[in-house]
Image: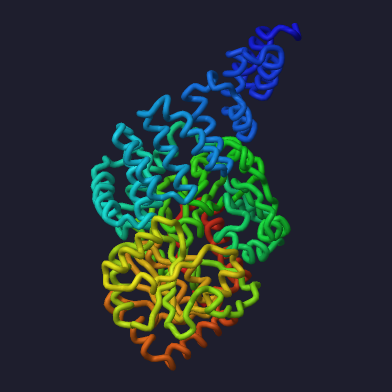
Amino acid sequence: MPGDAECWVLLANARRKCGDLDGAISAATSALGVDPQQPLAWELKRVCLQASRRTHELQQFLLGAPQDRMSREAWLDLIEASQHLGKPVDAVGACLQALPKWPADRVLNFWLGIGLAELGMKAEAAECLRTALLLDLGPLEVGVRDLLAYFERQACDWAAAQEQLPRLVSAIEALPPEQSVCTAPFTHATLLDDPAVQLKAAKAHALHVERGVVPLPVRAPADNPRLRLGYVSADFHQHATTHLMAELLESHDATRFEVFLYSLGRSDGSAMRRRIETCGAHLVDALEMSAAELARRIREDAIDILVDLKGYTRDARPAVFAHRPAPLQVAYLGYPGTSGARYMDYIVGDPVVTPLEAAAHYSEKIAQMPGSYQCNDGTRVPPLPARRSEHGLPDEAWVLCAFNESYKISPDVFDVWCRVMRTLPQAVLWLLECNPAATAALRREAMARGVDPQRLIFAPKIDPARHLQRVACADVYLDAWPCNGHTTASDMLWAGVPVVTVPGRTFASRVAASLLHAVGLPELVCSDVAQYEHMIVDLARDPLRLEALRTRVRQTRHQSELFDGAAAARHLEALFERMWSRALAGLPPEHLEAEIA
């Protein structure tokens, strides 16, 4: 009967058991309309909203719930939904309400750390993860330790991070082969220069991703008039990856390729989002799809080559690829390292970042672009330098720019920068303002190394166009290691600023070298840290050489394929066609060396 709440509950439960989640939600809502206190109706609605990934509705439902209905599981649903919706304030608020009831809950402490990190409170986030670790996380411990080291480095808490890193390496090395463990591969890819450890951490995580996934039936390659390309990303808006790729996406040859963009993120209404919406590709909103649902959609779209632009970065969905929706699956651009996954066939690199002699450290086959693997948008107007005074820079100083995210700044890197500062008393060090803890720590560390903290000038994050104008004020860009500047380094070159780098053994540590080779400036790639330090000092003491170098850098904006997204599209298309030719011939993926004219 319509006025009987229990009848609606029975109907909701029956529909849930039949897999009709939407019908179950509707029936449970009707039950609550009759009796707002009906506990089973409330619980059924929560469970079905969560299972159907109706995240916004779930969050609103739980935010309005009576406190006595909020079980631990309900609080966790609210926290995770808030995080997924990009609302860390709500997530942290929910954690702070739940923790007094369950203060020793390791998962709640973990999520509080994640939320605080999203709010820029890196030091506080690290404390929450330390608490979670004390509460015995079992198989999750390795991944949480990875995140703890990452947060500590973001806060420039070097003593804690340096203590944590050897433990991470030991934990990964101790894992049995083929062990499934939730790790945080991004930490290993960016904080360590050990490709073997990176591969093992990534493999363990990829096996964890695969758990419970039933791959779709194998789809044989077909020789169609146009190859269907699918790009998967959460960043089709104002984001570094899309700034790099915009011209490439606009330049795909529509006579040979049909392009689909599967968006895991929200539209931010930006000019970049509008540009992506009109680039000629099919844009599919996949934010609320489960991994299985998205995999089925990709299979229905008959995608031939599916490209992962995220890897193991924020909001990545590697489980989509674990379902094997496409005959060929390729990693490109967004993640500087191996996936460790048997469901990824190729990784796109170049002769510098992924030399074939390093193939043993990749689970994928290496496919090399000529020049640099990194694409850039050459349609941008070259920036006009701003006045230094507009950004708090002394007019007469020698400006050493190091706009690295704080996690990239290790004590070893900072030691070198401070030695340079002591050698060059007219220099200032221009840094990116990442979070309050890092700013305070870097000032303290500078003083401890004999450098006046006032010579460190911190720049806030601003929109990309204004950022490019301000960085043109710098004299030289100081790259970091073992994780280089990636988009940051190419932005510096676009702005006419020389980049000095020292490469390591991993993808992430060789990106700046790749960029410099691509623009014809290999002399700025140093063989070791000593040469790096000497080169910076020598450039400061030889203004004529520096000005000649800056002129060459500015000329590369119009001469190098690094800043030609259309050329990058042609090179990437050629790689895709080589991959597909092998697949059509029944041949397995194999390393594809760069074809350089």
From the viewer's perspective, is residue 121 above or below residue 390? above
What is the quadrant of residue 531 in the picture? bottom left
The one of 527 and 299 positioned closer to us in this rendering:
527
Q: How is the image coloured?
A: rainbow
Determine the residue positioned at 49% across, 21% down. 71
Q: Quadrant of the N terminus?
A: top right
Determine the residue positioned at 51% across, 59% down. 333
The one of 379 and 441 positioned closer to us in this rendering:
441
Determine the residue positioned at 43% across, 83% down. 397
Determine the residue positioned at 39% across, 46% down. 124
Task: Please indicate whether residue 556 sits to the left or right of residue 199 in the image.
Answer: right
What is the quadrant of residue 287 in the picture? top right
Q: Position of residue 350 (x, y in %)?
A: 45, 67
From the viewer's perspective, is residue 30 above or below residue 55? above
The one of 250 and 439 positioned closer to us in this rendering:
439
Evaluate whether residue 301 shows in this view: yes
Evaluate whether residue 350 shows in this view: no
Task: Please indicate whether residue 15 sits to the left or right of residue 460 in the image.
Answer: right
The one of 424 and 274 positioned closer to us in this rendering:
424
Q: Position of residue 547 (x, y in %)?
A: 47, 89
From the viewer's perspective, is residue 493 above or below residue 94? below
Q: Position of residue 495 (x, y in %)?
A: 54, 77
Q: Position of residue 341 (x, y in %)?
A: 42, 46
Task: Please indicate whether residue 189 sits to the left or right of residue 582 in the image.
Answer: left
